[in-house]
Amino acid sequence: MSKSLTFIQTNASNPKTWVVIGVTVAGIVILAETRKRRIKALREEHFGAFLDRFELLPFPPPPPPAAKQTLSGLTFSISDAFDIKDYITGFGSPQWKKTHEAAEKTAVVVTTLLRNGATCVAKTVMDEMGFGITGENKHYGTPINPLMPCNVPGGCSSGSAVSVAAELVDFALGIDTTGGVRIPASFCGILAFRPSQGTVSSVGVLPNSQSLETAGWFARDPSVLCQVGHALLNLSAVTHKRQRSLIFADDLFELSDVPKQKSVHVVRKAIENLPGYQAPKHMNVGQYVASNVPSLAEFCEKSGKSQDSASTLKALASVMLSIQRHEFKTNHEEWSQTCKSFLGPRFSNDVVTALKSRNENIKSLYRVKTEMRATIQSLLKEDGILVIPTVADPPPKLNTKNKNAMNEFLDRNYALASIASMSGCCQVTIPLGKHGESPISVSFLAYYGGDKFLLDTILDVYASLQDQADIAASLAPMTDSNGIEPSEVMKEKGNAAYKGRQWNKAVSCYTEAIKLNGSNATYFCNRAAAYLELGRFQQAEEDCTEAILIDKKNVKAYLRRGTARESLIRYKESAADFKHALVLEPQNKTAKIAEKRLRKLMS
């Protein structure tokens, strides 16, 4: 029996004993409450973003005539995965911190930023072990999203994103494996850059999954985002004029609840009058990946689903997560086996899943990754920019308990994140205001190694994007009193003008519909019909081609393009179009008659 309990039993009848006990308990309660309030005040002071506060001063500037330090006067924070000399790198976990020694050297990326004149002021909270995309941390508390305090900030680099969004620092470093920089940037309404995989040094950075992850960075100002990129990637300051071709991933925008008026339309309008931007294209990325990444088919088949766009992207995300688990197990199996019980429940599940992973099909996983890089390189070449929504959903509420809803959230957002993670290409996250209370963002992806091209693009287009986002925010929701989208209203006006044989008016109405929603094949196809009536056969052909790119089964587009090409005396191509229409619709009379007519003309 303890001495304290013996003392209480012996003196239980003495009133003074109970006074002493009462005072002691009250003292403990007061101390606990004081500590709670102090922690709350500290969290409110820096939004719960910081773990360790310090000041790493920049290197002394070089003497003239050397160039000025490009990041002079800027402050930054870093996620808890980057080494700082004499500090323990905690990896978002108190247990990891307890079982490891202080770092002997500072991470190369941090040293590079100090050498370029920046000052490092803090380490930030992150998801445990770099798993997860919500930003929640059971041990240190979840950093407060400045835009939506009751919702998650996104992860894994939650504290770094919050420190920038809350204007505590000018920029911040984070880790991006499966969206760890891109997703929190979107949820917190700031810029972020995920560079081409392997182009930024990983020396002094704790690995979660080295073949997927890279250090990335956050900023509020596009010029700061680019300056940091130039420093870390050692880029030339010379800007070369290049054509840019934007490609909208229509199937991916279908995953998002944000109206296209506030995303696709904003981007289209932003580049409309900028020099050097070609007319944007539209495509189905899921179908493109399915057609060009043959090794992915076996993972679609295992899930028991046909290889449509949605199942293709889900399979790609599944391969990404399998690689992550395999590499995490390889890196940290021994520590994880002994310490997994100390982790938060959600991340403990991630670690347990990683430890249970088997390596039977590991070659197949990496084959998908290799093919994916080649596929995106082939699509984008040196002037292409793929435009996608950064996230599919608004930030979930803190401590969401609904497992089904959370699993669906993870599925959709991992699908979007997997494109850059699995191809290794560079991606920039761009805020575009709000939809309701939730932040909006889109992402631009460029080819592997096209980091400077992408950074230059952001500097070029950012101001125009923000102007158009402001205009979109000021407009009334784009539906009429019956809930019909304005693009559909303009299409109906075009149809009425077409029936009234007002061909030019029809063209104008369809053009407005396309400006409002450039991912609808019908609008292009209908405008082509009006162009045919006006004898503008080349424009009709171009519109039909655009419609076919959006919808490969659009029979009318093949028929009208065949008509346009016949009028341009390109009989062979015309015949091919009518033949394709018959494949899609074997009983189509127009196509049958045209094919016979062209066969006679060509003979």
Image: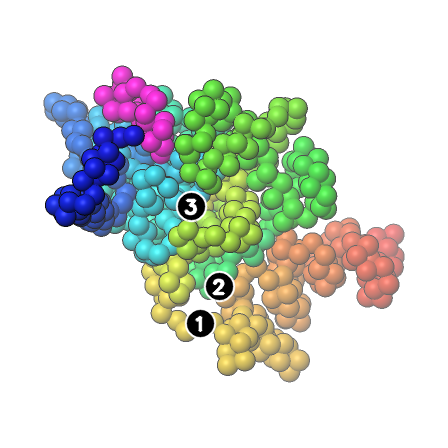
Residue lying at 53% horizontally and 76% vertically, measured from the top left:
483
Would you name the residue on which mark 3 appears?
134
Counting from the top left corner in percent of width and height, residue 225 is at 31, 41
Most foreground residue, 550 or 138: 138
The magenta region covers 81-108
In this view of the protein, can residue 104 be seen by the observer?
A: yes
Q: Distance between the residues labelled 3 and 1?
A: 29 Å
Counting from the top left corner in percent of width and height, residue 404 is at 56, 52
Would you name the residue on which mark 2 appears?
259
Looking at the magenta stretch, what is its main secondary structure? loop
Closest to the camera, between mark 2 and mark 3, is: 3
Q: Distance between the residues labelled 2 and 1?
A: 9 Å
Pointer 3 local density, CA inside 10 Å: few below 14, some 14–19, many at least 20:
many
Indicate whether residue 93 is drawn in magenta. yes
Q: Distance between the residues labelled 2 and 3?
A: 23 Å
> What's under tag 3, amino acid-wise?
Thr
> What's under tag 2, amino acid-wise?
Pro
Most foreground residue, 431 or 76: 76
Q: To which quarter of the image does residue 567 belong?
A: bottom right
From the viewer's perspective, is 578 left or right of 550? right
Residue found at the very far top of the displayed protein: 104
Q: Is mark 1 on a helix, strand or loop?
A: loop
Residue lying at 39% horizontally and 44% vertically, measured from the top left:
136
From the viewer's perspective, is 125 left or right of 275? left
